[in-house]
Amino acid sequence: MTVDRLTLLDESQPNPAADRRIGPDELGDGMADCCVLQQRLHGGLCDGVDVIRAKCGDVTLALLPTRGMGIWKVWVGDEEIGWKSPNRGPVHPKFVPLTEPGGLGWLDGFDELLVRCGLESNGAPEFDASGRLKFPLHGRIANRPAHRVELSVNRSAGEISLTGVVEETRFHFTKLRLTSTVTLRRGAPRVWIRDEVENFSGSEAEMQLLYHINFGQPLLNPGSRFVAPVRRVVPRDLRAAEGISTWNRYAPPLAGYAEEVYFLELIGDESGVTQTLLKNANDDRGVSVHLNTRQLPCYTLWKNTTAEADGYVTGLEPGTNFPNPRSFEGQRGRVVKLAPGAIAAFDVSIEFHSDSEAVRGAEEAISALRGLDKPEISERPQSDWCVIG
């Protein structure tokens, strides 16, 4: 029997199915190379994590409803795309101490290819005048489990989609609902993400969202380059300023390397649509992040080329704001205001390039967006974008 829509996870079900496979027969005509596998992991830091592996054509992804609908890994054919964190993940949120006094507990669970930061805040930890933690690093949404996940099939388009609902709430405070739909399409080496954030409070709310999209080898290696239609580049701090001459190029792994972070303004087309590219040193593998600058006007490039054992990785991070402390960004208006019942929508997609021709096509598309404009590159942090002092 074929299915058009199927509930995979629902908190109202007393005994939800922890392990099941939906194969081509259930997915229907034209979906012979597609399947969905639902699992619940056991043991170690993964204990209790729900994973949904969806395959459509040559692309397979591992989705994590337990971790805010993050994407753990993607496989294009047999090639694994993601990065190797020293954390043995995917890590269940029960092992992530978000409220530890130093504010860095989020890092205990950091392991995914795509992890969302937000929704109340998405930046650096912030403390009150007495030194108590107000906002932890990167917010709470990545460690909130979805309470409902549905699979839908569009046979005419050759698509399968997974839609999950995650809420970030606190009595007397924030009441935000994330509805995330992740889509795969046969014949397309790409993952589409459509997120809607709803304020279901009776009062106005503010929100922030940043997509922390992370890559290691084989896309990141010595000599890899970041290519983008950039209007402005600003180093986040004096450490990043030291590397401003090579801000878009990557070094070999180096033990003890201190991260470099750059804040960017991108050029989009007349509708705000734009893309960025990470390509390897041989120009024969790459990945593009597609976004809309009207939805996500701020872009962060995170370079962490430390030793491989410590997590050799880079982050391509479109967001509503820069990941500074919440108060700093709020004072500069880099928040999304939502009236009661209002919804803000965000569209991001990740496209994988498996040969030199595809990489070259992505570079040409970026060149067309950039035109003859040359980026404004600041050699030092700027007070409008960066916390100085």
Image: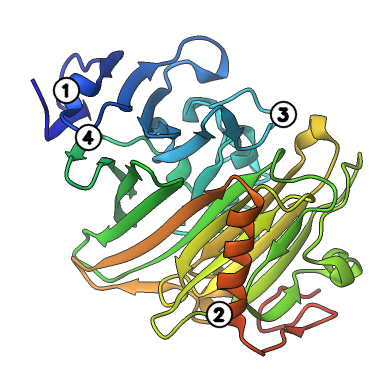
Q: CA distance from mark 1 to mark 3?
A: 38 Å
Circle on res. 309: none
Circle on res. 26: 1
Q: Nearer the viewer, mark 3 or mark 2?
A: 2
Q: Measured from the top left, where is residue 154 in percent x and y?
A: 18, 43
Q: Amino acid at mark 1?
A: Glu
Q: Earlier in the sequence, mark 2 or mark 1?
A: 1
Q: CA distance from mark 3 to mark 2?
A: 37 Å
Q: CA distance from mark 2 to mark 1?
A: 42 Å
Is disc 4 in contact with disc 2, using a CB cutoff of under 8 Å? no
Q: How many C-alpha atoms fall within 10 Å of the one at disc 3: few (<14), some, or many (≥20)?
A: some
Horizontally, is 245 left or right of 114 in the view? Answer: right
Question: Label 4's element?
Answer: strand
Is disc 3 in contact with disc 4, using a CB cutoff of under 8 Å? no
Q: Amino acid at mark 2?
A: Leu
Q: Which residue is mark 3?
A: 86
Residue nearer the viewer, 302 or 28: 28
Q: Where the N terminus falls, by quadrant?
A: top left
Horizontally, is 3 left or right of 274 in the view? Answer: left
Circle on res. 369: 2
Q: Amino acid at mark 4?
A: Leu
The residue that appears at 40% across and 39% down in the rendered structure is: 144
Q: Amino acid at mark 3?
A: Pro
Q: Earlier in the sequence, mark 3 or mark 2?
A: 3
Q: Which residue is mark 4?
A: 151
Q: How many C-alpha atoms fall within 10 Å of the one at disc 4: few (<14), some, or many (≥20)?
A: many
Q: Nearer the viewer, mark 1 or mark 3?
A: 1
Q: Where the C terminus falls, by quadrant?
A: bottom right
Q: Earlier in the sequence, mark 4 or mark 1?
A: 1
The residue that appears at 30% across and 67% down in the rendered structure is: 344
